[in-house]
Amino acid sequence: MRGPARSGRRAAIAAIACGACALSALAAPATAAWLVSTDVSLLGGTARDPQAAFDGDGNATAVWEVQIGSAWFVRAADRPAGGAWTAAVEISPPGGRSPKIAVDARGTATAVWEASRSGGSVVQASQRPLGGAWQAPVDISAPAGSLPQLAVGPQGDAVVVWQRDDGGGRIVQASYRPPGGAWQPPVSVSPAGAAPDNFQVAVGAAGQAIAVWQRYDDPVYRVQASYRPPGGAWSAPVYVSPEGVNGIRPQVAFDRLGNATAIWLQSSGTQWRVYAADRPAATGAWQNPVTISPPGVAGTPDLAVAQSGAATAAWHLQSGTSTIVQAAQRSAGGSWQTPLDLTSAGTDSWPKVAVGADGSATVVWKHASGGAQGTHRPAGTGEWQAPVDLSAPGSVTTGPAVAAGPGDDALAVWTRATGGDFLVRAAAYDGTGPQLRSLAIPARGVAGRPVAFSVAPLDVLSALGQTTWGFGDGAVATGTQVTHTYTSPGSYTVTVTSADAQANISTRQQTIIIDPAPAGPPPQRQAPKLTSLKQTHSVWRTYKAPANKRPKLPVGTAFSVRSDQSVKLSFSFSQQLNGRKVAGKCVAQTKKNHKAKPCTRAVARGTIARNAGAGIYKLAFIGKLNATKKLKPGRYTLAVTATGNDGQRSQPQQIRFTIAS
């Protein structure tokens, strides 16, 4: 067989936002890897059919159905970029089944599912804005609607298609939701009496949509499609597969220009092969189909198309007693290439494929051992990596499914059995370096004066490594916030590189112009001056005590201080505790030193930092240093210092207060 080739090392360049900065990207080696899988759901129930999606910043969302007792629910969990999976929440009422998930470019997630009702199931939908909560679900179909399929475009255009029995037979219906709007009334897109099945939908960048399905065209099944232009109505269905032969299990996808690609299984005898056809946006007509799989019995095809138009299809192929997974790819505007075997002889099945915006592709499948496996093809290489076991043999109960993340990142999800429960589990493929967020490289500087540089790297899937800077004059530094002083005027190329724990790196370059130092002595740097440090209450509580037990005291206080320039203020709190003087130092009292001379010692409890402009700054304070750390009752000293933009620090100002018990 033709085994999958191992990918070479490649560049991993993370996207950044830098305002008007003129940046250039450098190719940099990366060490990509599948990370150790982790549970997404908790014990207690039977989870099934997980689905996942990424937004453009690397925030991931998963949904699945779970049975608790005799009731089914749809649950969801999020994994913020650089974070861990959140606790799962139920987003459907009892009876929710078969969920689907999609996320638009703004990070708004949409989930749909089938909800059981006494008068027949309905299709429901819910939205979750980025960083927000799932909204109450809404019905988008009449009763007897089931098996929804969902697609969401980059701008938020959403389309759901489902199957409905209207009394005269099954039909495919659809509902459209404009960006930021509400779901429109459903419309029928398939003809009556066609018994449609295996329907799918895709949404393009401009909001256009295509629905495909198989219909019974006696004596065979054929693939049909209906097109909905932006803001328009669904067209009359047209046949995509030829007459006289069976065409089933269609898949469809758009590229960013609105060109559509469909694949399906086709047979005129004992063999089933995968066929593909394109619908160019310029003509609006489906072209003649081509065969993309070899002779044999193919099954469960899946399709993904990159924004560039590059397409990847995967399927399983039976040959004798063996079943393998194959994949074929097509470059933008090109022809389908000869398929490659992704697995060796076994019983591998149910492949799923996802492609990233950069053209990378990931395929996952259920392995002959009963576990999940996956492989990845980095962008620009055309070479599939060796398959990797994502789960233990015999552990997969449903799935796996896969979603493409930013760059070369991807996420696989499946369910595994443990005791009497089925849990959702996920494994990530990390092939992309950190995102270089908030990159600040000044356009100009002055010789002999320090220049500040900063970046806030964030890696979607792994822990961060080291960040290094090259200033173009031979000097280097490490850290996310650094300064450098150029000794000579001129043009210099500043290079910042950040790595993650997998050794994936991201690099950016920008030119800085260093002007000559002005004539005369250098300007004197002036340290900030702090004055008028005050507090509204010197004795206060962190809570309101019952009036019949303790005298009334205010809750919290407010500190105020005046600065003569824009500064970074540091509020440092130290507690005054009783101690004993030993060897000239005031230390904590122990059994050994309890007879030594008493003294008062200061114990640092924490610091609060705030940016402030020139003038009076007020800090309302109720004893909390952060969300989890709170000062205990006792006597305290507050020391306030200020640091100016040039690094000069003020003299500290101090004030005392007491937190009553």
Image (cartoon, rainbow, N blue to C red):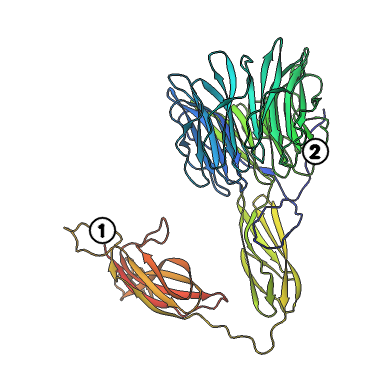
Tell me what residue is drawn at x 28 percent, y 58 percent.
543
- Choose between 159 and 625: the one closer to the eye: 159
Q: Quadrant of residue 630?
A: bottom left
Tell me what residue is drawn at x 69 percent, y 25 percent.
225
Q: Where 369 sits versus 56, above or below? A: above
Q: Is residue 375 visible?
A: no
Q: Left or right: where does residue 379 sit relative to residue 52?
A: right
Q: Which residue is mark 2?
A: 331
Which x, y percent locates residue 107?
Answer: 57, 45
Nearer the observer: mark 1 or 2; the answer is: 2
- Choose between 66 and 389: the one closer to the eye: 66
Q: Quadrant of residue 540?
A: bottom left
- Choose between 502 and 398: the one closer to the eye: 398
Question: Which amino acid does the dot numbered 2 rest on?
Answer: Ser
Q: Is residue 643 visible?
A: yes
Q: Which residue is mark 1?
A: 544
| Dot 1 crowding, Cα within 10 Å, few <14, some 14–19, many 20+ | few
Which x, y percent locates residue 224?
Answer: 69, 22
Q: Left or right: where does residue 553 sit relative to residue 568?
A: left
Which x, y percent locates residue 343?
Answer: 74, 29
Q: Where 19 sits versus 521, above or below? A: above
Which x, y percent locates residue 128?
Answer: 51, 41
Q: CA distance from mark 1 to mark 2?
A: 69 Å
- Choose between 92 and 300: the one closer to the eye: 92
SS type, badge 2: loop
Q: Residue furthest bottom?
A: 520
Q: Residue furthest top?
A: 219
Q: Left or right: where does residue 506 sit relative to residue 534?
A: right
